[in-house]
Image: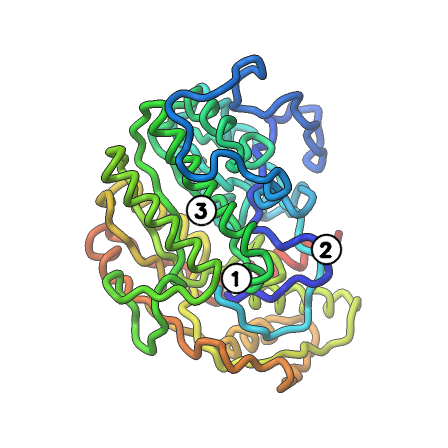
């Protein structure tokens, strides 16, 4: 769902490019925090310097301050009970809630291994979609190497080169990056650095190491030109925000990797997705968080909103990551796949469904001052290609998604 701007923090909101937690001994409790490693996992000994191959043609060194672009923007946490395995837009101002973002639960023992033994790499493995992806892959028996900035800073070209040379992955799911559409206007440099330069460093490292991998670049439906009909992969592009521009640039880098380096790069364009662990700067989790706090008596039983008439193609993040896996397993390199439900829901409908699930009465108050005339009235995708070619379709009903989301925030409200 669309994101709201997080004004309560001095630093920008991030997509949650997080880090792999070390496996825990039986003596440690489920809420214990892993100690920081002495050096980033998956990276060669500090005595090894430089990187194979020629230096990148795109910005050899990036300003050190911009490296915060891939940092974790919140602490990590254990729990909640139902989501312990891992984990945890265009912008539509719909709710006043700008509460703290949830901290992310730990990785279950056995979810990830050392870089040297896993050929499947997930970047952004502690972000919203990335964490669900690692969980999905783990359940299917896949050994995963999970990267976040603490392991490998994608803005550090040499570190990325060393790590890729050590790992030599055969499959890469590239989920790392900045995803805050509204804040991309205020932090254009961070957005372009994290999404574009980070992607370039990853592709450059694969080339330098002589590694041929199936690489999925997870893109966004916001690269499309606005339309009032269902968007197909062949529709015109027209990114209207710095974020959307950065996602299109990622695709262009991937296409270059195919043509010049012979990489097997695949592309997804995801429409709105939500579910447990999504932070409260998105509309649906913002509503869920407020309801959970109202149920606990922590705030007045009223939710103030703006434009609720925008319609969004919305599906469950757990279906999203199933699509990612299907694209990598069966997709055609160079091909783009929409990941969407093919059905829109008005934000009003999402809110009313959540309110109906509340254990206490909740009033909805509309504030016209929150309306944004520039909001796209409709964002709808066509999923014919991914269904026809890969056999994927969304499986989880919206009510189940919203129920799980609300339960997640109820557990958060107990903390």
Mark 3 vs mark 2, CA separation in Å: 24 Å
Name the secondary structure under disc 2.
Answer: loop
244 and 176: which is toward the camera: 244
Above or below residue 49? Residue 4 is below
> Where is residue 7 shown, x and y percent of the image?
70, 63
415 and 199: which is toward the camera: 199
Of the image marks 1 and 3, the number of the one nearer the N terminus: 1
Is there a contact, CB below 8 Å, between mark 3 and mark 2?
no
Of the image marks 3 and 2, the number of the one nearer the N terminus: 2
Asked whether, in this view, residue 84 is left or right of residue 193, the answer is: right
Q: Nearer the viewer, mark 1 or mark 3?
A: 3
Asked whether, in this view, residue 195 is left or right of residue 81, the answer is: left
Q: Crowdedness of circle 1 by 10 Å Cα count: few (<14), some, many (20+)? A: many
Above or below residue 294? Residue 61 is above
Q: Which mark is residue 10?
A: 2
Q: Residue furthest top?
A: 47
Above or below residue 116? Residue 217 is below
Mark 1 vs mark 2, CA separation in Å: 17 Å
Q: Is residue 361 visible?
A: yes
| Residue identifier under label 1 | 181
| Residue identifier under label 3 | 196
């Amino acid at each position: 769902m669309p994101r709201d701007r997080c004004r309560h923090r001095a630093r920008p909101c991030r997509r949650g490019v997080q880090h792999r937690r070390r496996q825990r001994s039986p003596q440690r409790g489920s809420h214990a925090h892993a100690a920081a490693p002495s050096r980033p996992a998956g990276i060669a000994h500090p005595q090894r310097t430089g990187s194979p191959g020629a230096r990148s043609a795109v910005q050899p060194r990036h300003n050190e301050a911009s490296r915060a672009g891939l940092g974790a923007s919140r602490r990590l946490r254990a729990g909640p009970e139902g989501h312990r395995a891992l984990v945890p837009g265009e912008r539509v101002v719909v709710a006043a809630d700008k509460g703290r973002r949830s901290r992310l639960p730990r990785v279950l023992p056995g979810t990830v291994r050392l870089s040297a033994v896993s050929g499947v790499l997930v970047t952004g493995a502690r972000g919203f979609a990335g964490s669900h992806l690692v969980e999905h892959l783990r359940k299917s028996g896949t050994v995963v190497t999970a990267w976040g900035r603490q392991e490998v800073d994608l803005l550090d070209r040499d570190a990325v080169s060393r790590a890729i040379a050590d790992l030599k992955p055969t499959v890469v799911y590239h989920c790392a990056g900045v995803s805050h559409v509204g804040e991309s206007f205020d932090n254009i440099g961070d957005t372009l650095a994290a999404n574009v330069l980070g992607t370039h460093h990853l592709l450059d490292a694969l080339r330098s190491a002589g590694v041929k991998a199936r690489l999925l670049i997870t893109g966004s439906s916001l690269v499309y030109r606005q339309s009032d009909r269902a968007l197909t992969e062949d529709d015109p592009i027209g990114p209207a925000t710095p974020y959307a521009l950065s996602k299109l640039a990622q695709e262009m880098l991937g296409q270059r990797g195919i043509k010049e380096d012979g990489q097997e790069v695949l592309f997804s364009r995801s429409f709105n997705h939500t579910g447990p662990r999504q932070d409260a700067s998105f509309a649906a989790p913002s509503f869920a968080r407020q309801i959970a706090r109202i149920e606990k008596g922590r705030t007045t039983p009223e939710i103030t909103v703006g434009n609720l008439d925008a319609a969004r193609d919305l599906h469950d993040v757990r279906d999203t990551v199933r699509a990612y896996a299907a694209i990598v397993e069966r997709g055609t390199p160079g091909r783009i796949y929409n990941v969407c439900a093919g059905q829109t829901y008005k934000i009003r409908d999402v809110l009313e469904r959540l309110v109906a699930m509340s254990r206490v009465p909740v009033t909805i108050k509309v504030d016209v001052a929150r309306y944004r005339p520039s909001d796209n009235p409709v964002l709808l995708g066509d999923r014919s290609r991914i269904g026809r070619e890969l056999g994927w379709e969304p499986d989880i009903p919206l009510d189940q998604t919203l129920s799980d989301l609300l339960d997640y925030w109820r557990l958060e409200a107990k903390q």
